[in-house]
Amino acid sequence: TRSFESHLNDELATVAMGKQVAAIIKQGAVIYLHGDLGAGKTTFTRGVVQGFGHTGKVKSPTYTLVEPYELERANVYHFDLYRLGDPEELEFMGIRDYFSPQAICVVEWPEKGGEFIPVPDLDITLSYVGDERKIVFKSTSERGAAIVDKLKK
Ligand code: ADP
Ligand code: MG
């Protein structure tokens, strides 16, 4: 496991960190985002999605569970499982189809998905430091380790 940690002074820093990760990802990745409500998971995801070339809004798919961004550079799928009742619902929505090896899948509240979501490459935790935030990256695959190594440089 490789890990990397950074302090995020403000919202812009959180977005910039997401963009930095997007710039590093070569092919697909499965990214789990942990952290309390308001910790910055959606803000970070906005950076990732914009980093892949999306110029419009990024809103949390709280009721739809997934928001697809099918962009020129990659397909990015943003999941928010906060309101997921039964993890089996994921099977009905055909969740496996989103997790192709080339896709970037960013998952808020992955713990709600149980075993119905694929294992991650990167496990990220956002937390409060007073009014500011901290982000901790842990790699959980070779693909994830390559990303964390580049973040360290
Ligand atoms: P989550 O998806 O984890 O519930 P959001 O990204 O929706 O959180 O909301 C995070 C809130 O915190 C937003 O109001 C955003 O402006 C703010 N925020 C994001 N990053 C930072 C930061 N590094 N420092 C201070 N405030 C931040
Ligand atoms: Mg959110």
Image (cartoon, rainbow, N blue to C red):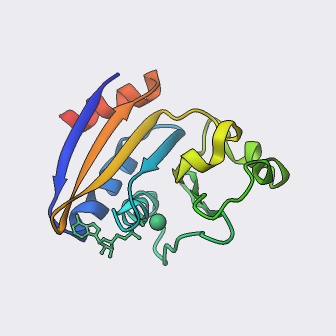
Residue at the location (42% across, 30% down)?
A: 144
* Count of marks, rendered view: 0
Dividing the picture into quadrants, the one containing residue 150 is: top left
In the picture, which quadrant includes the N terminus? top left
| Residue 123 pos. (x, y %) | 42, 38
Looking at this view, name the residue that lies furthest to the right.
92
Direction from residue 59 to residue 7 in the image, left or right: left
| Residue 84 pos. (x, y %) | 67, 59
Q: Nearer the viewer, residue 31 or 27?
A: 31
Residue at the location (17% across, 69% down)?
A: 131
Dividing the picture into quadrants, the one containing residue 14 is: bottom left
| Residue 88 pos. (x, y %) | 79, 48
Location of residue 70 with respect to 137 vertically, above or below: below
- Whether residue 40 is visible here, answered yes or no, is yes
Looking at this view, name the residue that lies furthest to the bottom.
57
Q: Nearer the viewer, residue 71 or 11?
A: 11
